[in-house]
Image (cartoon, helix red, strand yellow):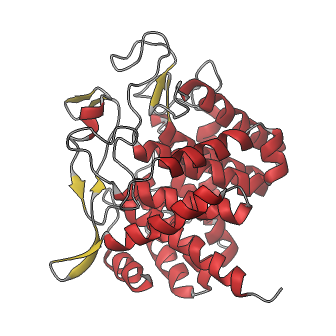
Amino acid sequence: MLDYFDAFVTRYQPYKGGAWCYEDGCIYRGLVLLHDATGDDRWCAHLERLASAQVAPDGTLQGYRIDEYNIDNILSGRALFALDRWTGDPRWMRAAAFLARQLDTHPRTKTGNYWHKLRYPHQVWLDGLYMALPFQIEYAQHVKDAARVQDALAQMRAALGVTIRKDGLYAHGFDAEGVQDWADSTTGQSPSVWARALGWQAMALVDCAELVGIDAFAQAELLPPTQSLLEHLAALQVDDGGWWQVINLPNLAGNYTETSASAMFAYAFASAAGLRLGCDQVAKAEDRVFDFLQTQLQSENGQTRLTDICHVAGLGGFEGVYRDGSPGYYLTEARVSDDAKGTGPLMMAHARMLQRQAAQLAPA
């Protein structure tokens, strides 16, 4: 699988023409973790090559505008901390400071959560939890700002509260004003449970737990909902080892096992095992999902590619289409191969698996 990652990153082109974006950040995060797991400097070299084209010496980020208040743009910032450690070049922390400045003034809902974007006002999407909160904690730890850490944990707790459904799963989005057509008139929640939204959420939870430590995570009242989510996910695993695109509706016509969410869950399960957050059911699901992901690597035009990735999904208006959040909507989005939102999490998950294998082989 490492050969696939190396070939993928070698031919990788910036997702949005070189503009700073979260999709590239998925790959950057995978490269950081692969280096941590293997010690192989080729992953550092790939990351520095790609990121250097987007970050100027003064820290300016290519194509980035703070006044868009797009929470997605924060995610790639997590790679800056590793680049700073590896190179000592001041550009990386200058760039991180730009992103932190966005969070300082980013609009918030009444519950204290960051708006998903300025163009999506008063909305909290599960995606945004992963985009912003681990970066905020890591930056806060770097600059020794305990208040930022506590704010991130409080935001996570508040977001879980407004998105949790009666079935114990989480809605993709929440409209604090209740004005969106997709929002339930009582709860403000979107109508469906999208697998990748839960994937972003699960990764955000385990990363925050790792960053602050289990004791602080438990004190923030985040440990029980994290364990409950992981157990729910394990129970929803499909026989082939993956998870449905609309995760809780196995009989929905056209539903399919979606690769990016499955890779995210693999990462969350492997991380939870390292933190000793999992249970036997979660451990069994972890073993099965890695087998599933291996089957999703298929030859296309002579190259190995990761298949059956949902290209994009969201809520509300986008490029002339209104995304109503219904179960059927999530099945209308294109399925693609080698998308960063799938390959990046697979890199991350594989790195975690390698770390666990190394730990098991280490002498007691």
- The mark total stands at 0
Q: Quadrant of the N terminus?
A: bottom left
Residue 323, horizontal then vertical, whole percent: 27, 30
Name the residue at 35% across, 82% down. Answer: 7
- 104 is higher (above) or lower (below) than 242: above
Name the residue at 27% across, 59% down. Answer: 308
85 sits to left or right of 352: right
Residue 5, horizontal then vertical, whole percent: 41, 78
343 sits to left or right of 268: left
Residue 272, horizontal then vertical, whole percent: 66, 59
Image quarter for residue 11? bottom left
Q: Is residue 111 visible?
A: yes
Image quarter for residue 6? bottom left
Q: Quadrant of the C terminus?
A: bottom right
- 149 is higher (above) or lower (below) than 26: above
Between 121 and 311, the one nearer to me in the picture: 311
Name the residue at 38% across, 58% down. Answer: 239
- 178 is higher (above) or lower (below) than 318: above
Residue 174, horizontal then vertical, whole percent: 48, 25
Image quarter for residue 331? top left
Between 223 and 133, the one nearer to me in the picture: 223
Q: Is residue 58 visible?
A: no
- 318 is higher (above) or lower (below) than 333: above
Name the residue furthest left: 301
Between 95 and 79, the one nearer to me in the picture: 79
Name the residue at 57% across, 87% down. Answer: 40
